[in-house]
Image: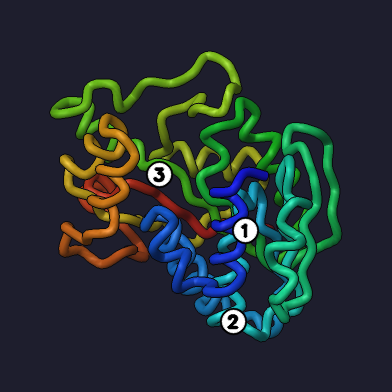
Amino acid sequence: MGLAQRIDETLHRSLGLAYLRLARERAIHERCAYALAALAALGIERPRVLDVGCGGGILLRHLARHRGDVARYTGIDSHASRLEWRYRDVAIPHRFVDIDLDNDWRVETHDVAWCSEVLEHLIDDKGVLARIARAVKPGGAIVVTMPSLPFLERIAKGPMPEALNVSATQDGWHVRAGYAPETIAALAASCGLGIEHVDAISPRLDFEIVIRYRAKAPLWQAIDRIKFARQPAFVIGADAQTLAHYFSIAAVLRRP
């Protein structure tokens, strides 16, 4: 671990969300706020939460701040176990498990699964969603977020033609540009899941996205900390016009 990483780890553990709000992309926190709202709407007491493709595990920090009643948090990703030390101060019972999402993985049953900005990176999104579905109890919920295809199609016609570019291989970039309500519905149906509602997260003006993907990190990171769009951070029950101006689309899926 380099010096910058050690400093980041130390600040993360000592300052928690106060530091993360400055050091991590604003959209991550907007998605976590949406996750908290979705969890509250589900009305589950002492929920068991599965974080699929947990990345840096930031959802756990938000849960610790706002949902101390979580019975168990499990974060899974290809190198998730490295996060154990980072979150050892969190009181919520939790664990991080190294899992290749493309494999035939299994974990214990949860009440809610959260899968944020993951499926667009995976060729077999249906297979991964099916494995997530079997990891939640009957009647349980799966909350997903991914890039909004209506948003990307709109800006691809204007200031950012490359917005719809994808990778032909699973190399870390998107293998599909994004999702629309109809593609989410088809994906959910293929896994035997119902849809509660489709939502929108992270309103962005066009220039913000252009800077995000074309400018060097110091510039876009500085711009990212400023909220330019006046819309709320997320909209529950979003229509097509709303989705065209929000960077992420989300949905609450239900296992029968």
Mark 3 Cα-neighbour bin, 10 Å: few <14, some 14–19, many ≥20:
many
The residues bearing labels 2 and 3 have C-alpha atoms spaced at a distance of: 29 Å
Look at discs 2 and 3 and give the one toward the viewer. 2
Residue 216, image x, y percentages: 30, 34
Q: Which residue is depicted at the point 64% across and 80% down?
A: 44
Out of 6 and 30, give the one closest to the viewer.
Answer: 6
Q: Which residue is depicted at the point 25% across and 67% down?
A: 232
Q: Which residue is depicted at the point 61% across and 49% down?
A: 55
The residues bearing labels 3 and 1 have C-alpha atoms spaced at a distance of: 27 Å
Farthest front residue in view: 3
Instruction: Indicate whether 244 appears above or below 40.
Output: above
The residues bearing labels 2 and 1 have C-alpha atoms spaced at a distance of: 15 Å
* Residue identifier under label 3: 181
What is the number of the mark on residue 57? 1
Mark earlier in primary sequence (3, 1)? 1
- Is residue 214 left or right of 129 when viewed as pictured? left
- Is residue 210 left or right of 79 when viewed as pictured? left
Mark earlier in primary sequence (2, 3)? 2
What is the number of the mark on residue 67? 2
Q: Which amino acid does label 2 sit on?
A: Arg
Mark earlier in primary sequence (2, 1)? 1
Q: Which residue is depicted at the point 74% across and 70% down?
A: 88
Out of 213 and 183, give the one closest to the viewer.
Answer: 213
Residue 113, image x, y percentages: 66, 59
The reply to whether residue 193 is in sight is no
Mark 2 Cα-neighbour bin, 10 Å: few <14, some 14–19, many ≥20:
some
Q: Kindly indicate whether the residue at mark 1 contacts the one at mark 3 (C-beta within 8 angstroms).
A: no
Out of 42 and 67, give the one closest to the viewer.
Answer: 67
